[in-house]
Image (cartoon, rainbow, N blue to C red):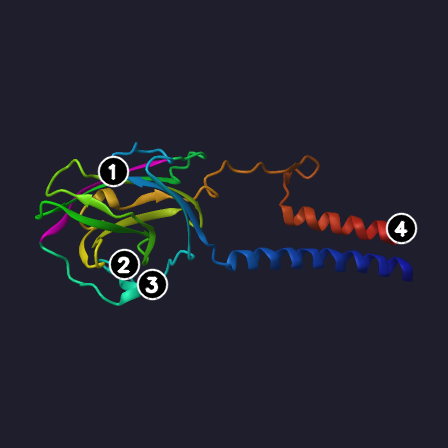
Amino acid sequence: MKTRTLSIRSIYYAWFTVLLLAGTVVAYADDQPETRLSTTSQGQGIERGSIGGGVVSHDELEPLITRGERTTTARVSSQQKLSGGGSQASSIDFWIYDADVDLYSDLDRDGYFAGIDLLFDADTNYSVADVYAVIYLSYEFGPWNEYVTTQDFTIYGASSDDEYIVDTELVSGYPTGDYDILIELFDAYDGTFLASFGPEDSSELSYLPLEDIGHDTPQSTTVIVTEGGGSVSWLLLLSILGVAAVRRRVA
């Protein structure tokens, strides 16, 4: 009887230990912020909705900030961060006339997409100017998160022939949800802030259903145990394996 009591107690200890360890691993993984990864094609006159045209970059960014107050504009360029210079007021000589967004890549067909095809038209009162843009995403009306900085490009007055295309596939670090886009334009020479264009200027840049490729996958198949008539989670499967191992050891 004593040997039998110890064996059952050992089984219960093993079962609870497996559940505790598995739960700890899951909780730890959920608490860790995920680095954002994306692939971008950009340029003027490139094919839309296709990674591979123009300049291609593979970007690794800090984890997405989802909580906090969101301002109307971010107004911080990479050059401004380094030099501390650049004007924070928009210029009356530059503006973004329009922007258009097409979403693509929804493998699991849940209505959320991993691809962003963004086209915008920047204009100026000058005959020619060299500029670049910083583009941000806001998750569920949270703070702006930079996701692309364009190459320097040239705009010609108010021409529509100098439209710029930024095609991005979200690889990881972007949870399923609604996102807004903000475009900010800067002088290529000294990083001076010139103009911005966001969800308050166009509905094209608001409430975009997005998720990264890691979330854009078909749902996994649930394991069914015919004797019990119900679904078995992977935690329960681990506990069953743990109990079986203890039984074999006792035997």
Magenta-highlighted residues: 93-104
Nearest to N terminus: mark 1 or mark 2: 1
Q: Tell me residue 9's x, y (percent).
A: 80, 60
The answer, for residue 210, to whether it is visible in the render is yes
Nearest to N terminus: mark 2 or mark 4: 2
Q: Tell me residue 16's x, y (percent).
A: 70, 58
Q: Which residue is mark 3?
A: 68
Residue at 85 percent of width and 57 percent of height: 7
Return the residue nearer the eye: 103 or 184: 184
Return the residue nearer the eye: 19 or 8: 19
Q: Which residue is mark 2?
A: 77
Residue at 41 percent of width and 37 percent of height: 110
Report crowding for label 4: few under 14, some 14 to 19, many 20 or more residues within 10 A (C-alpha).
few
Q: Which residue is mark 4?
A: 251
Instruction: Please tell me the numbered disc located at residue 44.
Output: 1
In the rendered structure, which amino acid carries the disc numbered 3? Gly
Is disc 4 placed on a helix, strand or loop? loop
Q: Mark 4 and mark 2 in contact (Cβ < 8 Å)?
A: no
In the rendered structure, which amino acid carries the disc numbered 1? Gln
Nearest to N terminus: mark 2 or mark 3: 3
In the rendered structure, which amino acid carries the disc numbered 2? Ser
Q: Mark 3 and mark 2 in contact (Cβ < 8 Å)?
A: no
Is 24 on the left-hand or right-hand side of 176? right
Say which of marks 4 and 1 sits in front.
1
Is 8 on the left-hand or right-hand side of 70? right
Nearest to N terminus: mark 4 or mark 1: 1
In the rendered structure, which amino acid carries the disc numbered 4? Ala
